[in-house]
Image (cartoon, coloured by chain):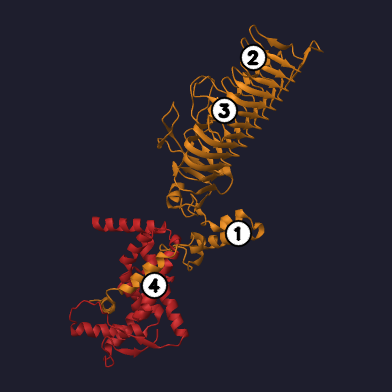
Chain colours: A red, B orange
Amino acid sequence: MRRAEAVARMKRELVRRAIEGDHDAFSSLVDASVDRLYAVATLILRDSDRGQDAVQEALMSAWKDIRALRDPDAWDAWLHRITVWACYRAAKQERKRKTVELKVVSDPHRADVPDSAMALANRDLIERQLNDLPIEHRAVIVLRFYLDLPLDEVGDILDIPVGTVKSRLHRALASLRESMAEPAADALPVGALKDGTA
Amino acid sequence: MNDDFRFERLFEDGLHELAPRRAPDRLRTKVKAETSEMRPRARWLALIKEPPMRINSRTAAGSPTARVAAIMVATLLATLLVISAGVAGARLLAADGPIVVDQSGGGHYTTIGEAVAAAKDGDAILVKPGTYVEAVVVDKDITLRGDGPVEDIVITAPEDGPTWEVDFSYINTLPFALVVSEADATLSDLTLRGLPSRLLLDGGDTTAEGLYLDGVGEFYTGSNVAKTGGIVVNGDTTATLRRNTLRGGGEIDVYNYSNTIIEDNDLIDGPNIAGLFGPESVVSGNRITGTGFQGIVFLGGTEATFTDNVIEGRERAIGLGLGISTGPIHAPVIERNQVSGAANTAIELLTATGGRVVDNTVTDAEWGIRLGRSEILVSGNAVEGTTAGILVGGPATIEGNHVQGNITGIRVNSGASPTLTGNVVCDNETNLAVLGGATPILVDNEICEDGVAA
């Protein structure tokens, strides 16, 4: 607990210094958050390249607009929000280009732990579920189940009421439940290419 | 197991399986490199750009209210720029957007201290009406400005608040409400209220204007006990004090020969201007009225200028105060001041070397212009209604003065050797009194004797 407080205090100090224009402090914050943001963006966009672009845009924007940050303790939530909005913009641009290719790639940095058959099946199932959801619903799922954020914070980040968060979660869970009842005949291994929409 | 909970767990596990563990190195490298070339934009610009959020959002960087306010401020600034197309407008736009302090929570901060801590050089802080019980130290080049009726924006030093070290020989530390320390700051349109709520300027180059000091510091009561200022300019400081009002309380104190411009201030019932003035110092256009012992007291200094001040009803209006030995006064300029009702002395220079006293108006004083042994030019002054109009004790040059309606017009003390040229000295009970041992040089004066020129 004491360590967590110390970390929080250190992060608060870094944010405060970054707000004052200290780029070294901002770089430290980037190091601390870029992996998480990249994971979030890749999950939401279902594409590692576009996820990378979205995170880059988000972090650039975070630096440019850091003086808008009122409360240093809100840094993470603010960053998540900027990232999700960058994802939305990326998806919108992608739709405009009418590109439907969606790459699902394996993570080259993934720990070398052998998958169990069940884990692989679950992953493929979730993958299909995510791909079938609109991006706004995917964002809810990722924030809630990947970042483990409370419902109200998910609503804050996405600028939607908690009721909408709940309904989107419910729909996603219902869809997953239905999928579990069906045979996963079309399940594809991770790393394959397949069509979908963002 | 609850069904929903099971599927939630499935999502959690699946997402963690799917998520990449680490971002590519080139991403973090690129972000750091590109941001290192950029500067964060001004807060008000950042707020405008911020996407809309719900009002109760705790993650909000800028609430809709702040965003709307920022847009309004931006619009206003842009309008000002278009209208004025002047330097001031350009500066406003070039500077960071204002940080708003509002005790009621409507601004970015609720205390001035927090806002100052968050500010950077060049920022402007606007303080909304309220009583802020704080001792604020400004150590950045910022503007701190009241935004509303000045009497409603009050800073009061807390009881048992911190103190600040000053150089004055009598007192080492003073409590304060506002200190500017080694910074080039601008302070305006604020009220400081209560005896300990001093403004201390310690280093840097600060402008304080439109402040209202209400009963701040202690004032001279006529005893030889030094009291403490409401505004203290300490150490190596360049300060401009303009259009401030000090009512009751202590003086404007300038220590250690600081270069200070003190102009167009209104000092009422107690406060005076006192100090060791540096060569660039100007004390001009001030009104010193109401009750009180001193007006302008220069304890020491070189080439300081005292012009166009109006001093009414102070016992000692302009001069060396109380005989305190704090160093020489060299070449002061005392010009175009209006002094009336000085129960003791209107203009007093006991030890000055060089300098001039010109074009002043003195009425209704005990002593008019009292020079002691000063070597100084006294020219073009009008002195009326005193016990003694001009008292000379040294080698001064007295020329072109009008000395009328006094008990004694000009008195030359023992041992003095002044030069009196072109003076009009009439309608006094005694126009010219030369005491034993004095050797004045009289050239082209109009000195009346019972209505007849001598």
Q: Read off the chain for label 4.
A: A
Which label is found at residue B417?
2
Spatial CA distance of label 4 from label 2 is: 86 Å
Q: Nearer the viewer, mark 2 or mark 3?
A: 2
Q: Quadrant of residue B150?
A: top right
Asked if badge 4 and badge 1 are on a common chain, one would say no
Discs 1, 2 touching: Cβ within 8 Å: no
Tell me the crowding category of disc 3: few under 14, some 14 to 19, or many 20 or more residues within 10 angstroms, Cα based: many
Residue wearing tag 3:
B270
Residue wearing tag 1:
B76
For the point 33% across and 90% down, the residue is A194
SS class, disc 2: loop
Compare residues B277 and A16 and report the one nearer the observer: B277
- The answer to whether residue B270 is seen in the rendering is yes
Amino acid type for the residue under numbered disc 4: Gln
In this image, B192 relative to B59: left or right? right
Tell me the crowding category of disc 4: few under 14, some 14 to 19, or many 20 or more residues within 10 angstroms, Cα based: many
Q: Nearer the viewer, mark 4 or mark 2?
A: 2
